[in-house]
Image: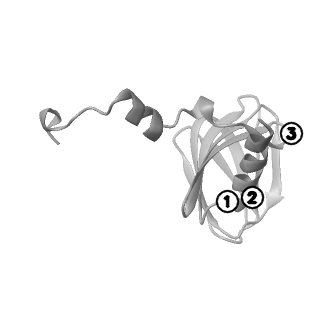
Amino acid sequence: MVESTLTRASKQEHREQVIQQSDIPALQMHPGTQVRPVIMPGATVSFVRLVPYSEMPRHSQERDELVVILKGSRDDALDGKLYRLEEGDSLYIPEGAEHGSITYSTGCTAIEICAPGRTDLAERLEVLLDKE
């Protein structure tokens, strides 16, 4: 890609195409767990923040999930095994697998990618935005 052959997006085009994480409403999923989801056709990408010493209870989902740790660490339970995830680690969680997580003193910032998309988060976002 040669930059000189490209036209820079206008400010309006930039605003329409680029998503600022801070502009995404925060949803409280569990005590100490905040999710900012980006809903797309076929997938959901969520920016997740777990405060120190918080827990995401074990559950299963009808979708595949990939967790990418950006900062901090957490332990993830997956099908009866415990995995320590640290900055730069990823964990694939297949559809139907029981999983949950717990943080310690550092807390954790992660991206979670779910396919197919999470209709539950889309519905919660819609309700939240309708209230504004």
Relative image position of residue 81 (x, y in whole percent): 72, 61
Q: In the rendered view, does 18 fall on the left or right side of 115?
A: left
Task: Name which of mark 2 and mark 3 comes first in the sequence.
Answer: 3
Mark 3, residues whose alpha carbon is within 10 Å: few (<14), some, or many (≥20)? few
Element type at marker 1?
loop
Count of numbered circles in the view: 3
Q: Looking at this view, is 126 or 28 the one in front?
A: 126
**Residue 130 to residue 61: above or below:** above
Q: Is residue 65 left or right of residue 123?
A: left
The image quadrant where one finds the C terminus is: top right
Q: Which residue is mark 2?
A: 120
Going by the numbered disc 3, the residue's amino acid type is Pro
| Circle 3: element type | loop
Q: Position of residue 44 (x, y in %)?
A: 59, 55
Which residue corresponds to mark 1?
A: 118
**Residue at the image position 62 percent from the left and 61 percent from the top:** 117
Of the residues under marks 1 and 3, which one precedes in the sequence? 3
Q: What residue does disc 3 label? A: 31
Mark 1–mark 2 CB contact (< 8 Å): yes
Looking at the image, residue 109 sits to the left or right of residue 30; the answer is: left
> For the point 46% across and 33% down, which residue is it?
15
Mark 1: amino acid? Arg
Q: Nearer the viewer, residue 113 or 86?
A: 113
Q: Which residue corresponds to the image point at 78% horizontal and 31% vertical from the top-left?
A: 52
Nearer to us in this view, 32 or 98 = 32
* CA distance separating discs 1 and 3: 20 Å
Say few, some or many: other residues with alpha carbon within 10 Å of mark 1 (under 14 / 14 to 19 / 20 or more): many
Task: Give how far apart the Cα atoms at labels 1 and 2 are.
Answer: 5 Å
